[in-house]
Amino acid sequence: MKYDIPVTKTKHSRLSEVDFDNIPFGRVFSDHMFMADYIDGEWTNLKIIPFDRFAIHPASMVLHYGQAIFEGMKASKSFEGQALFLRPEKHAQRLNVSARRMCMPEIPEELFLEALHQLIAIDQAWIPPQEGSALYIRPYVFGNDEFIGVKPAEKYKFIIFTGPVGPYYPKPVSLIAEDKYVRAVKGGTGEAKAAGNYAGSLLPARIANQKGYDQVMWMDGKEFKYIQEVGTMNIFFVIDGKVITPATDGAILKGITRDSILTILRDKGYQVEERPISIDEVVAAHDAGKLEEVFGTGTAAVVAHVSKIAYKDRVMELPPMEDRKVGAMAKAEIDGLRSGTIKDTHNWIVPVGEYAQVDA
Ligand SMILES: Cc1ncc(COP(=O)(O)O)c(C=O)c1O
């Protein structure tokens, strides 16, 4: 271990108060959290402490200028009860992509991974053993100078906390192709997992809900023609046997589930294309009876099937669920890797606590 992370354990575990068969999403938090401060150009004050509130100054820069980035990932238990992560280093790397774009200090990958392994090892008992359940993990970083004025902060906090979540059985989602608001443009912040991106998505999402749709399908900000992604998921189309997903172009979040599913599909011999896909192409495929599946991918749901897509004055209904073979297969593969029923040929699975230090 390269980093010394002192641990203060809670004297009052809340674990016995939690009903793992009935966990409200996003409201239950585990016993401990990791915290670090960035001061004078280095990460310091590393510690694992009981999960609790902490104070920040009213002038803390994040509250005014929004330097805040985060990750969302999971630890789960295999059938044999082993606690494991799926591709944790990818989340460390993406957090640093976000940090660079938002002019924030990077977190050394070893620091991220050591903190993660130690924290989750301590709160292992909080990983629900039920199939499909997991421990949701939220690493985040924010600018914390006590200062008014637009500039990059000099002090930051890096925190990781966790909370158990139940199985996510998403019902198929209905989408509306957005033709007024944009989530991101090339050169903007769409490729960063920056808090402000989510704030900007709330109004269009509320309007979509008021029209009776679950989520917004984001389009490019220039022509409102090319499809980007959906809510908090990347999007895949199966057209005439081919699987197509928008190429990441600087405006789309590079989903880790997207990357895993692309790899799985290619391994299985599917014809896969990462390229710009226009709404006109989707409409034409639908009209020709060739739009076989549409699904979103992300850490929370893994795969969420799309039931229908509204675009201007028309609504495209998608084929019945039993015909959605590609999305169902992709989800089963990722679930199988996590549960240990499918062989991990890519070394994506990392047991909690087994952090091999790579000396720089
Ligand atoms: C905007 C957005 N797109 C896509 C995704 C899917 O990314 P991942 O598969 O890494 O969870 C997420 C979730 O993190 C997201 O917030």
Image: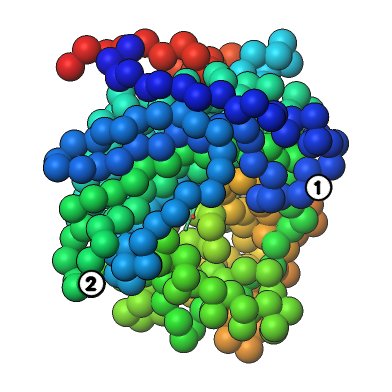
Q: Residue at x 69, y 29 (%)?
A: 13
- Snapshot quadrant of residue 317: bottom right
Q: Quadrant of the N terminus?
A: top left
Indicate the amino acid at tag 2.
Ile
Q: Which residue is identified by label 2?
A: 148
Outermost residue on the bottom side: it is 313
The residue tagged with tag 1: helix, strand or loop? helix
Residue 160 percent location from the top left of the image: 46, 38
Q: Please name the residue shown 59% across and 53% down the image.
A: 296
* Residue at the spot 69% in from the left edge and 83% down from the top edge: 210
Does residue 329 show up? no
Kindly check if marks 1 and 2 are in contact, taking CB atoms under 8 A apart as contact. no
- Is tag 1's residue or tag 2's residue first in the polypeptide sequence? 2
Give the answer, above or below, for where 274 lies relative to 315: above
Query: Between residues 69 and 93, which one lies in front from this camera angle?
Result: 69
> For the residues carrying marks 1 and 2, which lies nearer the camera in this image?
2
Residue 202 as seen in the image, left or right of residue 326: left
Local SS, label 2? loop
Label 1 sits on residue: 322
The foreground one among 124 and 300 is 124
Q: How many marks?
A: 2
Q: Say whether residue 20 is visible.
A: yes
